[in-house]
């Protein structure tokens, strides 16, 4: 970045991803023959040929391939619009890996970055900088509330912002929206964003709303105070007259388990009042982090705090130690089992592990019936909350896991509906006309997969293993994934909210 004066660095950084005038010859036309088309609308599968030319879908029907077309045999496979991941943390990772292999190997063709209040920072390495073709996948961004709050308040952010500071933040939101951001994101459970009052978020959301943006939030609490936090998000939508997206909706502690119906009722009653609220969800009932995050008051050696923390996640049996340098023999045992083996209590064992340098844990803290109830709602999308290099299996596994585990094996969702949640629903949320559907004239972001084999393979111990069953992925009509590896093409676009189908 040579100059930051007078420009919004986040979007300047992303703008550098944008391809210049491409000197490459246009990709050959492609006809995918005989696949079952899941067109993104939720309509039943239908057998058809899909022809792609000039980066767009030329026809869907029974037309035979034309002379010179590359013909792809789709027999036994499903062709769907490329998946749009509305909550993705790849902004950093793209700098090191423009192929975004773990993302396109899942069928993701558009990465929506800048969630949870944090948008890409200007000083980091810029993906694809100076290259003609920057990344395999398209990138869209949000303006991060915490990012701009930090920019305006500096290190003095642990307080309520003054009106002049809110005005400065609003000016940054304004600029970001003008430069093509899709809305404002917040992470109110985190350090910087958490000091933002509701009224601050309302003021900033009003600016995003004026430019057609949405307010996307990791809400203030996903545990015992989930309902208060949901009500705050709805109130922000109501007061700022802005569509609201609840990020990675979940009920993460025992106190709120099995209450999905109540959360759904809260949201759907807001919808009936005219507040436009939607959500996304990742398909995992566990999180991974360090053992200390279990204790919100940070009193890791105070038995009552530890006891409370373990009770909140349903007991020490839900805490799996995955990394502990001092005692590798504990790895892949639950805290409960380790304590039993060592004839101590789980609380004492927890305190000892922290004393011995801490540990990596996987904590099962959501219940399947809540996850299922959310996914069954038509307004809940599939999103990963993952991204390149994310140390959770959702980083490489989200979309194939929904298709393999929750469509094919568990039958929570019908295939066309699951595809709809991955394509047209997020496209419509972002007002990306011309994406998220298979129809003549749409941008040819496509994924061809095997519905009988598609599945995630990433695990908590090995979160980078690529999914399987995604046979081919095209971005803007160019093949970027051939079922085994990422190809050399970098057709990804930086999408902009200020143009019709996001093309600059
Ligand atoms: Zn989040």
Image (cartoon, rainbow, N blue to C red):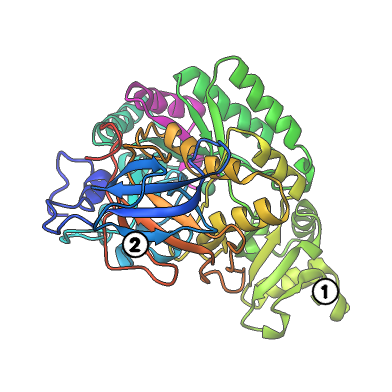
Return the x and y of residue 190 as percentages of the image width and height.
Answer: 51, 47
Return the x and y of residue 95 as percentages of the image width and height.
Answer: 30, 63
Disc 2 beta carbon < 8 A from ligand 1?
no
Compared with residue 377, is residue 57 higher up or lower down, i.e. above or below?
A: below
Would you identify the image quadrant in which residue 220 lies?
top right
Query: Total number of numbered labels?
Result: 2
Would you identify the image quadrant in which residue 397 lies?
bottom right
Q: Is 238 a magenta residue? A: no
Q: Is residue 120 visible?
A: no
Q: Is residue 353 left or right of residue 209?
A: right
Q: Which residue is mark 2?
A: 480
Q: Nearer the viewer, residue 5 or 366?
A: 366
Choose the circle earlier in sequence order: 1 or 2: 1
For the residue labelled by badge 2, is the local secondary structure a helix, a strand or a loop? strand
Q: Which residue is mark 1?
A: 337
* Circle number at residue 237: none
Q: Is residue 366 left or right of residue 474?
A: right
Q: Nearer the viewer, residue 118 or 101?
A: 101
Q: Nearer the viewer, residue 323 or 447?
A: 447
Counting other residues with Cα less than 10 Å from the Cα at mark 1, is it few (<14), some (14-19), or many (20 or more)? some
For the residue labelled by badge 1, is the local secondary structure a helix, a strand or a loop? helix
């Amino acid at each position: 970045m040579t100059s930051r004066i007078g420009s919004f660095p986040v979007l300047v950084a992303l703008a550098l991803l944008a391809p210049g005038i491409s000197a490459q010859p246009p990709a050959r036309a492609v006809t995918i023959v005989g696949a079952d088309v899941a067109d993104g609308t939720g309509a039943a599968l239908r057998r058809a040929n899909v022809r792609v030319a000039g980066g767009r879908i030329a026809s869907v029907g029974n037309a035979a391939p034309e002379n010179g077309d590359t013909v792809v045999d789709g027999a036994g496979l499903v062709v769907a619009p490329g998946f749009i991941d509305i909550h993705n943390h790849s902004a950093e990772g793209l700098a090191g890996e423009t192929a975004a292999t773990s993302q396109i190997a899942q069928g993701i063709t558009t990465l929506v970055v800048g969630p949870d209040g944090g948008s890409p920072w200007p000083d980091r390495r810029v993906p694809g900088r100076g290259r003609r073709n920057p990344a395999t996948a398209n990138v869209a961004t949000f303006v991060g509330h915490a990012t701009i709050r930090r920019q305006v308040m500096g290190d003095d952010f642990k307080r309520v912002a003054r009106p002049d500071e809110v005005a400065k933040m609003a000016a940054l939101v304004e600029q970001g929206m003008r430069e093509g951001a899709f809305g404002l994101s917040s992470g109110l459970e985190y350090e910087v964003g958490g000091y933002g009052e509701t009224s601050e978020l309302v003021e900033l959301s009003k600016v995003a709303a004026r430019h057609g943006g949405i307010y996307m939030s990791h809400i203030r609490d996903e545990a015992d105070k989930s309902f208060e936090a949901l009500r705050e998000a709805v109130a922000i939508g109501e007061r700022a007259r802005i569509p609201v997206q609840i990020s990675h909706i979940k009920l993460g502690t025992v106190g709120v388990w099995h209450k999905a119906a109540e959360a759904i009722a809260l949201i759907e009653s807001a919808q009936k009042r005219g507040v436009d609220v939607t959500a996304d969800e990742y398909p995992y009932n566990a999180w991974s982090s360090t053992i200390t995050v279990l204790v919100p008051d940070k009193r890791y050696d105070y038995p009552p705090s530890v006891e409370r923390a373990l009770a909140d996640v349903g007991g020490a049996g839900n805490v799996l130690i995955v990394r502990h340098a001092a005692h590798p023999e504990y790895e892949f045992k639950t805290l409960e089992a380790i304590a039993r083996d060592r004839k101590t209590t789980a609380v004492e064992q927890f305190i000892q592990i922290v004393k011995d340098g801490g540990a990596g844990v996987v904590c099962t803290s959501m219940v399947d019936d809540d996850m299922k109830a959310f996914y069954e709602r038509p307004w809940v999308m599939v999103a990963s909350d993952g991204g390149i290099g994310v140390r959770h299996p959702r980083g490489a596994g989200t979309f194939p896991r929904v298709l393999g585990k929750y469509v094919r094996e568990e039958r929570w969702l019908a295939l066309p509906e699951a595809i709809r949640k991955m394509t047209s629903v997020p496209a419509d949320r972002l007002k990306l006309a011309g994406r998220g559907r298979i129809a003549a004239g749409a941008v040819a972001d496509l994924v061809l997969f095997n519905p009988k084999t598609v599945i995630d393979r990433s695990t908590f111990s090995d979160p980078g293993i690529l999914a399987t069953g995604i046979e081919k992925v095209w971005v803007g009509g160019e093949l970027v994934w051939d079922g085994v590896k990422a190809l050399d093409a970098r057709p990804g676009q930086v999408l902009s909210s200020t143009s019709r189908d996001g093309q600059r």
